[in-house]
């Protein structure tokens, strides 16, 4: 076992040490040293670590330093995965260069990104050669991209500074798995994505995001170079992302588009080529007509449970009892016929592809074959396998009372991660500002299948609280007489309270919602009030997306953001930028979401309560993320106002209160709270 130079690592953090000399805002924090010691131990002793480091601990340098020193000493790769692109970029562009200066040693690092971020030379050259007919917006986009494409060293879309209206055409140039010519590509040597892969091979530190990490896990490490040491930052959100990444989807729109493209565009086009067997092509067209008809019948059968209930929910989970119902059995039978016809079609298309060897159009045909095969594989697994497995959840994605896709996902990601990820790792560090519930890690350990590793003493946990003095820096107000959401005067009362808060703060306020509809309704009521008082109201989706709202908020002191999910954890407003944070509701997810239904099914099988084991701790972690928006530095000051009376009155409120960094809320009525608020803003 290698010996780790712990004293040497600690020296970097000491007062007047290299960190203090080189980083402008650095100050010694014992919590940061404790975390760095724990990360070092995990890497050097080949252990797993689960660490919560509250806001202000400085977790990034606490893991980067030991990761780099370990990598240099042992000549091993370390992969670091973050949730957000912003943090990924910050690590590559700012923090890792800082680490080089701090340790006065050079090392190689590279960013691993999905292929869709890179320009594909094959697509680009084909477009320039006029082989693809472009629409109006696409021509303008191409003209704007030309100078960059000819000069770019990386081909990474992040270098482009174009409007979102132009960037929406990026796909025409983006590398994608299905159209990639791989070894047959004429531009292999110049390929930007392959250059990235070469950089990753040579790098000691690889920075990636959760999505790419999970895709790599899903394809048994065929995307990233082999690695045995992994650090996952922002680990609190990995389960939600894993649920999406490990899901399969069979979509009516995608399958229909493929079949119709073949039927109406590609096959009629290649019909004119001399190398094409016309009889075979006609046979393909007959199969396509049948496949289209069956596809419509299959989705129409799936629509039946929706129309019978007049159901306009966005999703419908298929339960065990549904497997015996007539609509499901009928859909299954039609699906089997569809699979038979698709298999015949694929067989004939492959024969066509063979006789078109060397012909340019065969490239497009190959792409269609891969896509169609993938659709058929997904449909088969979902319908014939996953629907009948107790460890899988199958659900219908609906829009305006019609099924648009059928999807499946494992009910618990733990076994997937155990089988595909943990077993190959020597060390894993999971870190975030919000992992513990009531200062315990059981929720996270269970959810991620790490309990056994802890029992075997291969996993350690660490909880380092924020060094900020929340009691002195913030007022924490809970309104205990807000009506419940279903009471008739709720909307009016809420709008009145928000108007009062905005009048007191005059801006620099972030209001977090959990419901899109409620956000829209309340924004409609209070917008005229804000306009009369020269306050700029920035409402997510109505006034722009996340980045636009953030920019406008920063530029206008008298502004207020009203936001949803992305603002609960994705925004960092330091100093005077944020004076008041308002939380409308405790952030419970809708139990109807497939993600929640999956956990419900999992805990039901264990005879445990899905609410206690999943919905409640999940909401606690999300609330911790939300309240963490207010105090981002030791000089920050402000108020949090929570407008959900359940936080003080419900049977589970203790779980929230024991988990938050703020203690002892001032429980006040709607009539009393303004005086308290004025003290803090
Ligand atoms: S190898 Fe694939 S992604 Fe790269 S340029 Fe060729 S077709 Fe495009």
Image: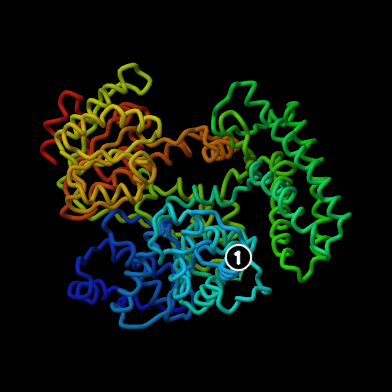
Q: Residue furthest top?
A: 488
Q: Residue furthest right?
A: 279
**In the visual, does 369 lie left or right of 487?**
right
Front in this rendered view, residue 37 or 56: 56
Q: Quadrant of residue 617?
A: top left
Q: Quadrant of residue 253?
A: top right
Judging by the rendered image, the residue that carries numbered circle 1 is 130
Q: Quadrant of the C terminus?
A: top left
Residue 525 visible in the displayed image:
yes
**In the visual, does 195 lie left or right of 402?**
left
Q: Quadrant of residue 600?
A: top right
Query: Compared to 479, does 594 lie above or below?
Result: below
Query: Compared to 488, does 241 lie above or below?
Result: below
Residue at the spot 20% in from the left edge and 25% down from the top edge: 670
Residue 458, position in %: x, y?
49, 62
Residue 524, position in %: x, y?
31, 29
């Amino acid at each position: 076992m290698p010996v780790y130079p712990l004293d040497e690592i600690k020296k970097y953090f000491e007062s007047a040490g290299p960190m203090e000399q080189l980083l402008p805002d650095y100050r010694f924090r014992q919590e940061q040293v404790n975390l760095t010691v724990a990360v070092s131990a995990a890497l050097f002793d080949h252990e797993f670590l689960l660490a919560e480091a509250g806001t202000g601990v400085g977790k990034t340098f606490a893991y980067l330093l030991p990761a780099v020193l370990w990598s240099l000493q042992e000549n091993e790769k370390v992969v670091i995965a973050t949730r957000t692109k912003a943090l990924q970029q910050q690590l590559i562009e700012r923090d890792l260069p800082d680490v080089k200066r701090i340790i006065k040693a050079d090392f190689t690092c590279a960013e691993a990104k999905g292929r869709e971020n890179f320009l594909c030379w094959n697509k680009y050259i084909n477009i320039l050669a006029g082989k693809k007919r472009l629409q109006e917006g696409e021509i303008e986009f191409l003209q704007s991209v030309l100078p960059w494409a000819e000069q770019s060293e990386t081909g990474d879309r992040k270098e482009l500074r174009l409007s979102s209206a132009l960037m929406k055409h990026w796909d025409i140039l983006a590398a994608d798995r299905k159209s990639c010519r791989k070894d047959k590509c004429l531009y292999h040597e110049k390929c930007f994505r392959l250059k990235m892969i070469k950089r990753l091979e040579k790098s000691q530190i690889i920075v990636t995001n959760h999505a790419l990490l999970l895709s790599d896990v899903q394809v048994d490490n065929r995307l990233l170079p082999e690695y045995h040491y992994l650090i996952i930052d922002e680990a609190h959100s990995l389960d939600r992302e894993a649920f999406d990444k490990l899901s399969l989807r069979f979509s009516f729109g995608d399958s229909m588009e493929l079949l119709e493209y073949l039927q109406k565009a590609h096959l009629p086009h290649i019909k004119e080529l001399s190398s094409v067997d016309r009889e075979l092509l006609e046979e393909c067209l007959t199969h396509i007509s049948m496949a289209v008809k069956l596809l419509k019948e299959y989705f129409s059968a799936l629509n039946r449970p929706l129309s019978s209930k007049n159901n306009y929910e966005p999703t419908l989970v298929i339960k065990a009892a549904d497997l015996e119902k007539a609509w499901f059995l009928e859909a299954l039978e039609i699906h089997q016929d569809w699979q038979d016809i698709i298999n015949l079609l694929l067989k004939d298309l492959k024969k066509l592809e063979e006789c078109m060897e060397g012909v340019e159009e065969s490239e497009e045909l190959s792409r269609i074959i891969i896509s169609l095969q993938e659709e058929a594989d997904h449909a088969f697994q979902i319908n014939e396998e996953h629907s009948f497995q107790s460890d899988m959840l199958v659900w219908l994605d609906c829009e305006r009372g019609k099924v648009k896709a059928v999807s499946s996902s494992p009910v618990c990601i733990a076994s997937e991660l155990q089988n595909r990820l943990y077993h190959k790792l020597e060390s894993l560090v999971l870190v975030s500002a919000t992992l513990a519930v009531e200062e315990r890690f059981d929720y996270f350990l269970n959810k991620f299948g790490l309990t056994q590793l802890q029992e075997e003493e291969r996993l350690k946990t660490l909880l380092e609280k924020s060094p900020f003095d929340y009691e002195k820096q913030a007022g924490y107000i809970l309104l205990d007489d807000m009506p419940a959401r279903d009471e008739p005067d709720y909307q009016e009362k809420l709008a009145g309270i928000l108007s009062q808060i905005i009048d007191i703060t005059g801006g620099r306020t972030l209001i977090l919602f959990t419901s899109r509809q409620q956000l829209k309704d309340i924004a409609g009521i209070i917008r005229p009030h804000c306009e009369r008082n020269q306050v700029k109201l920035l409402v997510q989706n109505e006034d722009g997306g996340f980045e636009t709202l953030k920019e406008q908020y920063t530029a206008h002191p008298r502004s207020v953001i009203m936001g949803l999910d992305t603002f609960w954890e994705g925004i960092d407003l330091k100093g005077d930028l944020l004076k008041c944070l308002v939380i409308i509701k405790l952030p419970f997810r809708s139990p109807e979401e497939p993600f929640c239904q999956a956990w419900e099914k999992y805990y039901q099988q264990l005879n445990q309560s899905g609410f206690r084991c999943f919905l409640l701790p999940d909401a606690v972690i999300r609330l911790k993320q939300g309240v963490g928006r207010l105090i981002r530095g030791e000089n920050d000051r402000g108020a949090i106002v929570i407008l959900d009376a359940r936080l003080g009155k419900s049977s589970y409120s203790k779980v929230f209160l024991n988990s938050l960094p703020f203690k002892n809320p001032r429980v006040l009525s709607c009539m009393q709270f303004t005086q308290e608020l004025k003290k803090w803003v």
